[in-house]
Amino acid sequence: MKVLGNNSLSSKVLIGLKFVIIVTVIAMIFITSILIKDVRDMALYGNQKLEETIIISGVFIAGFVFIAMLMKLIKFFKNLKYSKCFEEENTKLLKDISILILTGSIIYCLIAILQIIFSSDYMNIIVYNSFLWILTVIMFCLSVGIKIFVEIYIKAIEFKKENDFTI
């Protein structure tokens, strides 16, 4: 299967990314309703759901970062679909994606720390925090990996420009 062009892997990935954005927006609407209910309950009844509200708030904020990252990925794969492979715009998009993933990693790290501070249920801390720390490490490694890929991509663009000058 081709990687570049209209009937390529890039165009199939675009369809998948658009589907993921739709699902994420629906999830964000659902999370917003839960967050509003929790904040209302906290205002009426006190700090009964503080830990849950912190987690949901963090996931809500991370959702916006995730949507922004998906939008950058869609732009990147559109460039690949139209055979714009080694372009300066792609390096900027990949740098932005790397930064957004790192931002998501930091958000999940903060959620984990706040959960340790505000939670009284130690089993909850072990289960949720293990997941959050693993997610944080994976996202951090992915961010670093994309940053390395960007540097390789920049070198490839330089080689392409040199090659274009010799022809």
Image (cartoon, grey):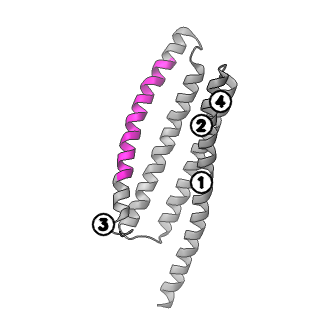
What's the CA distance linking mark 1 and mark 3?
28 Å
What's the CA distance linking mark 2 and mark 3?
39 Å
Q: Which of the two labelled residues, at mark 3 and mark 4, occupies the earlier sequence position?
A: 3
Closest to the observer, 49 or 42: 49
Magenta: main secondary structure equals: helix
What's the CA distance linking mark 1 and mark 2?
18 Å
Q: What kind of residue is marked 3?
A: Asn
Q: Are marks 2 and 3 in contact (CB under 8 Å)?
A: no
Q: Which of label 3 and label 4 is nearer to you?
A: 4
Q: Give coordinates of residue 157: x percent, y percent.
A: 53, 75
Q: Which of label 2 and label 3 is nearer to you?
A: 2
* Residue pointed to by mark 2: 131
Q: Which of label 4 and label 1 is nearer to you?
A: 4
Q: Which of the two labelled residues, at mark 2 and mark 4, occupies the earlier sequence position?
A: 4
Direction from residue 90 to residue 130 in the image, left or right: right
Q: Which residues are magenta?
A: 16-39
Q: What kind of residue is marked 4?
A: Ile
* Residue pointed to by mark 1: 143
Residue located 57% across and 64% down the image: 150
Closest to the observer, 75 or 26: 26
Q: Secondary structure at mark 2?
A: helix
* Residue pointed to by mark 4: 126
* Residue pointed to by mark 3: 6
